[in-house]
Amino acid sequence: MNFLKHIRFEYKIVSGYIIIGALWILLSDSLINLLFSEQATRAEAQLFKGWFFILITGCFLFGFIRKFVIKKARKEHELEDNQRIDQEFLQNISHEVRTPLNNIIGFTELIQKNDINEKERKDYLRIIQNSSYNLLSIVNDIIDISQLDYSVSELDEEPTNLNKLLKNLIISFDEIAKTNGIKFDYNCSLNKSEEWVIIDQSKIQQILLSLINHSFKVTKSGFIKIVCSKYDKQLKFYIEDTGTIISPEFINEIFDNPQKLKSRIHKINQGIGIGLSISKLYLDAMKGSIKQDSTYNIGNRFLISIPYKKAIAIDQKHSKTKISDTKKTTVLIAEDNELNFIYLKELLKKYNFEVIRASNGKEAVDTCKSNTEIGLVFMDIKMPVLNGYEATEIIKHNNPNLPVIIQSAYAMEEDLEFAKNVGCNAYLTKPINSQKLYFVVDNLIN
């Protein structure tokens, strides 16, 4: 009966009227002859047959049109509600984005003045840095909202080293924790034979990122901690903090009705954590669960549980894809933006690298072909002539052992998945976290 949904309303009315009329013409005479034996009674029944048909079709048309009008009115009401939510959403985004931007621009101007002392300069720099992290958190939440309408049921499970994944997360937030005076640590009780598991790495990382971001929003002092353990064929994660306690009722509302989060975007800096809704959807797909520990009374504690699937450890010590640490390595940075290139080049000064540049994807491919001394490639995605995905695929086809690190402003899950499919060794999202970059490069060297 699904095909009826695609038939226009006026066609349904006309078709229904014709079908009822045809059935009445075919069946009414036989029905009258069956019910009445006398000719006079049959003639009288024939007189009322037309009126009866009018009554039946009138009731049919009334019910059908009434149902259509109610359905249309409901859709219009929903549309008005969605328009109102979207309008509030845009207004709140404007307010939330402008607040940290005001701090960044304002204190940047103050730093340029000559009449401030060194302590004031450091204080202003710290405010600018915190406001930048704040702005990035807002952008991440907005991206999370845009993912709520997409299906998250498909999993891409692969062998993953949990200890390494958690260490990588700690490094990503290390600078934020130090700036805010918060102790940030993790404890993984899995031994060497247990730390390799089969999971959807990108999704579990997104879940943990969302919960850690949530903790940083509500925690002004104290600690944030991640605990990982294995219990009864389940992989357990505990994310604890000493921040403002969020009521269980409010957390349940976040999990149960993601769409309403658009109208609450103005509260994201108060710890709402829009990513929690994404996390719930991901965990449902993994046949896992997430809940808040109401007995934890010094802050917030979230408990995550997913099925434990043991994987065979991957020996990375003998991997052919690595950077030589015995001679000076030539590093190619494929980046069309001048400032991004300068910043990345400055970050790499701590290594004994010779840095060269390509301004587009085709130039990167040609340089890798002609220069056999290149030992590492940093690849931007959005570039002229040939984009970073296409360039990476060609480079890895020509030289599978040449490590390629993609660094891009694209941060959606499908972007990371696509990058993995073309053969990149690591993916760094902009703004680039220096500690995470060093962690990735050190792994390739060692």
Image (tube, rainbow, N blue to C red):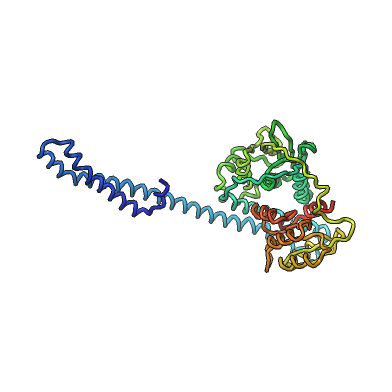
Farthest top residue?
232
Residue at point 71% right, 32% down?
A: 231
Viewer-proximal residue among 288 and 328: 328
- Relative image position of residue 106 (x, y in whole percent): 71, 62
Farthest right residue?
326
- Relative image position of residue 360 (x, y in whole percent): 72, 67
Residue 180 visible to an observer of this rendering: no
Residue 192 visible to an observer of this rendering: yes
Viewer-proximal residue among 159 and 379: 159
Count of picture labels: 0
- Relative image position of residue 224 (x, y in whole percent): 74, 42
The quadrant where residue 33 appears: top left
Residue at point 54% right, 55% down?
A: 86
Residue at point 73% right, 58% down?
A: 406
Q: Is residue 369 left or right of residue 256?
A: right
Judge whether 389 appears above or below 156 on screen. below
Viewer-proximal residue among 13 and 323: 323
Farthest front residue?
398
Judge whether 444 appears above or below 241 on screen. below
Farthest left residue?
40
Viewer-proximal residue among 401 and 331: 401
The quadrant where residue 255 appears: top right
